[in-house]
Amino acid sequence: MPQQRPLAGGEHSGRAPDERAALVLVGNDEGIRNYVGAELRKRYGADYRISIHDDRGDALGALESLREQHFPVALVLSALGDNDAGGIEFFESVRPLHPEAKRVAVVRWGDFPTVRPIFNAITLGQLDHWVMAPEYSPDEEFHRSITEFLEDWAATSQGRGFEAVRIIDKHSSPRAHELRDTFGRNHIPYGFYDADSEAGRRRLADLGLDSPELPVVALLFTPELTVLQQPDDMEIADAFGIMEPLPGDEIFDVVVIGSGPAGLAASEYAASEGLKTVVIERQAVGGQAGTSSLIRNYPGFPQGVSGNKLAFGMYLQAWSFGTRFHFMREPTGLFTDGDLRVINLNDGRQVHARSVVVATGVAYRLLNIPDLDDLMGRGVFYGAAVSEAPALEGKEVFVVGGGNSAGQAAVHLAKYASKVTVLVRSQTLAESMSEYLSTLIEKSAPRIEVMYNTEIVGGGGDEQLDHLVVKNRDSGKEEELRAAALFVLIGSQPRTDWLSGAVVRDKWGFIVTGPDLRSGSGDDILRLEVAGSGDDTGALERSPLLLETSMPGVFAVGDVRRGSVKRVASAVGEGAIAIQQVHSYLEMAMEPAESKR
């Protein structure tokens, strides 16, 4: 029987009125300070503490006081320019005091000499954003930027603001890590409470639970309180109401498998161009890109954009055009039924469509070290460090991997951890990491250290990771290092096992498309043998389309496709191109058979 809510709606915020987060402004330039201060007070004074200073020493004192009183700080704004030298050094002093606060440089319009040092500081992780000082009141462009900065801060400040979902579990639980990551990436506001803490025990008592099966997941947004104990993903999805069954006789124009950047772009263009579209997603929107704390080289975002924010915006856009999304489901097989393509799902159902776009991306490669595999989610994490980083403040953490994802994770972790060590098997980062990232890491020493020619051979801990064993590949010497956390980003493998026998894949499992399907004789006629049916459709007298697989009407885009460029922008482009080719395929499929010969 559903339980009644134990808490008043206002208590969902988890923050008393006198615990408002602070916006701290400092600057010697009286004009900027007064103008910015007035705008902040008028627009944000009701919801935030506004603290204004003309001296950076006084501002640091105020920040120390706020820290001692456990008051959150959302933004620290400092004027930069001829009258405000030393601003970058000030921002470096802010991070240890309030690692979650967003650091924002304020400059006058037209102060172009100041802009380059700001860009350099952002690249080096010394500040987070910049904004032009308001020139009039109200300056909505200024406020749009401030609101976006506050949104970014709120997204990384767990336990503050509205909680749609409440998770109660042991802090070291791998399942707790998985749930927090899934809810966070799907933009579902949640609060997490350690079951062994006073707050956690109080929340359990509020729910009338004495010795529950952990984790406990409480849905606070439903008409009547919904409390789940040790739920699996399907139970959570069912409680959310997002598991509406797909009618067995419903036929889609296109089904997109996966909702990373390529899949989201494909679904957006398909739906906006009138195609009946459904997306099947096993976990969360965004794919690997959705775990990136900051993508700095995506066009149109001069200050960078988090992978999660970019992906969620694409999801909302696709949804607004009519795309249907079905989460917590994954494909188990693909075959043909006449002109239709049929996808088997892990819940026993099937999806029928005239065309398919496979955008399943890739999965992280594992270390395959038993002692560390046993600690997955308890100090050992695969993927980027967005959700776990705040909990590692003042601790020593390690990142293994030499690619861009590893570099981004190290930079993000360095905002919180006392030291980040990157373990790399090669002798340089030059061949595997973008220059701006490798430069940033080099200039972040000693906060970030790189150990070259090094691999992990062991490690362990009782309930939580506490040490690693690494080996120098040249000398063979092994060394034990204390470690609070390890983030593993050592490459990936495609999620294509479910396509075995259905489409041509290379020896690594990547899907072969277009011209790469040509036979050794140079014959590029597309051939298909229907997997599992014993029915050979024979040869189609045409060449495969650029992104088409060996099964006509089935396309592959993004990281899962052999030869693809592993970049977010190119994945988005492939998703858009695939839909243009879907249109071409559907037109050809409607032609009389004799016209195809």
Image: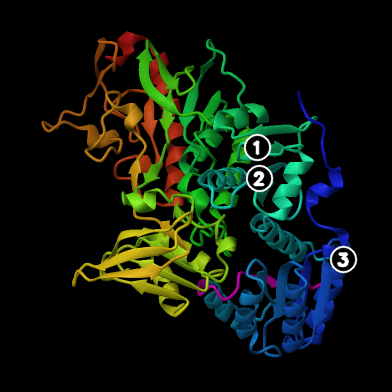
Q: Is residue 133 visible?
A: no
> Upstream in the sequence, badge 2 or badge 1?
2
Q: Give the CA distance from mark 2 to mark 1.
A: 10 Å
Examine the image and state in which quarter residue 355 appears: top left
**Magenta segment includes 512:** no
Spot occupied by residue 512 in the image (x, y as percentages of width and height): 28, 35
| 208 sits to left or right of 395 | right
Name the spot of residue 577 as percent of width and height, x first. Answer: 43, 38
Q: Nearer the viewer, mark 3 or mark 2?
A: 2
Q: The disc labelled 2 sits on which kind of residue?
A: Ile
Q: Which residues are magenta?
A: 123-137
Image quadrant where one finds the C terminus: top left
Name the residue tied to disc 1: 212
Could you say which is closer to the camera, residue 391 or residue 79? 391
* Viewport quadrant of the N terminus: top right
Q: Amino acid at mark 3?
A: Gly
- Judged by depth in the image, the label closer to the viewer, 2 or 1, is 1
Residue type for callout 1? Pro
Return the residue at label 2: 168
Residue drawn at the location 87% of the way across and 66% of the way down: 45
Q: Position of residue 535 (x, y in %)?
A: 26, 10
Mark found first going from the N terminus, 3 or 2: 3
Quadrant in the rendering for residue 473: bottom left
Residue farthest left in this picture: 521
Disc 2 secondary structure class = strand
- The local crowd at label 1, few if under 14, some if 14 to 19, many if 20 or more residues have their Cα within 10 Å, is some
Residue under the image location 65 percent in, 90 percent down: 85
Q: Secondary structure at mark 3?
A: loop
